[in-house]
Amino acid sequence: MILSASRRTDIPGHYAEWFLTRMREGYALTRNPMNHAQLYRVPLTPDLLDAIVFWTKDPAPMLPHLPQLDQYGIPYLFQFTLTPYGKSLEPGLREKTAILRTFQELSREIGKDRVLWRYDPIILNDSMDIRWHREAFTRYCDALAAYTARVTISFLDLYPKLRSPLLRAITAGEMTELSGMLSEIAGQFDLPIYACSEAMDLRPYGIAPAACIDRHVLEALCGCPLRIPRDPGQRKDCGCAASVDIGAYDTCTNGCVYCYANHGSAAAARRKAQHDPASPLLFGSVQSGETIIPRKVQSFREEQLTLF
């Protein structure tokens, strides 16, 4: 099993203590997003858990817990989203200079192959045009290229619920211009660049399709082959391998204006107020009449083979 922690919320940034408690107790409970009376018990034991993929915009609260996490012997890496946007788009985040230092500190602690940078999503508006991104991306590449193995980009998906004067659709022509520019800049820093879930083929610009939960990356991390199927629950342009996510929607208080996983800051604040670090659920508790179903998982390791 590959554990995703989490596409739905920032567990390293807001729920690090809860995550370490779940690891210590060997399981977590998640609610079925389509049926809240149905819960799944997800085992978090080394015999079944092949690797952990963390998703975060600021893992500073997790850093003190890394030695404890290392004791379980389970490989892990971070998908670390770090963009140059200010408080108007990402009001709940610390100043970016501080987060840049956290990125570098994490990389020094666990190695740059396990800290994968996401410049995601790319947003264009009246105050952030293509020239603005040229300057910002160059500056961030200069700060991070020595501390990461790759950068993954994506363009803003303007979901119907995302209504803000700061957000607009990006044209195909703008995507083309941005792709060529960002690829050229990344190349100047010898930084491989990938694209996440983009329908447009960006390979002519030197940008390969990304698999953010990438079987090949995980095999290198684990040191053995992994027979992982493609994730059928993701978008058609997503190349990710299958994983189990233990996060919950409407629990992240980063407040990003472009977020698809929240229904607003008030909803996230309400659910975060229901968080108990000792509970097996990320928010709330098990109620009378609710059903707990063991999640069927397996290890994907092929131990008889080795990559090295």
Image: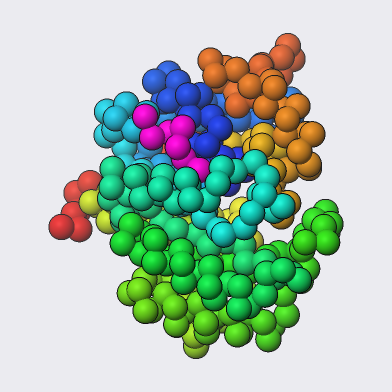
Give the percent coordinates (x, y) of residue 169.
76, 71
Give the percent coordinates (x, y) of residue 208.
46, 76
Q: Residue furthest top?
A: 288
Q: Residue furthest left?
A: 308
Magenta run includes residue 59: yes
Closer to the camera in the image, 269 or 55:
269
Whether residue 230 sits left or right of residue 171 in the image: it is: left
- Judged by its main secondary structure, the magenta piece is helix
Residue at image x 43%, y 33%? 62
Whether residue 24 sits left or right of residue 130 in the image: it is: left
Give the percent coordinates (x, y) of residue 59.
46, 40
Residue at image x 35%, y 44%? 106
Q: Quick check: can you spot residue 211?
A: no
Closer to the camera in the image, 108 or 242:
108
Q: Is residue 121 above or below residue 107?
A: below
Residue at image x 62%, y 62%? 121
Picture quarter with the C terminus: bottom left
Closer to the camera in the image, 85 or 58:
85
Q: Is residue 308 above or below residue 52?
A: below
Q: Is residue 193 above or below residue 249?
A: below
Quarter assignment of residue 179:
bottom right
Q: Is residue 42 above or below residue 232?
A: above
Picture quarter with the N terminus: top left
Give the percent coordinates (x, y) of residue 177.
60, 85
Magenta run includes residue 72: no
Closer to the camera in the image, 191 or 293:
191
Residue at image x 66%, y 16%? 286
Q: Quick check: can you spot residue 258?
A: yes
Q: Which residues are magenta?
A: 58-64
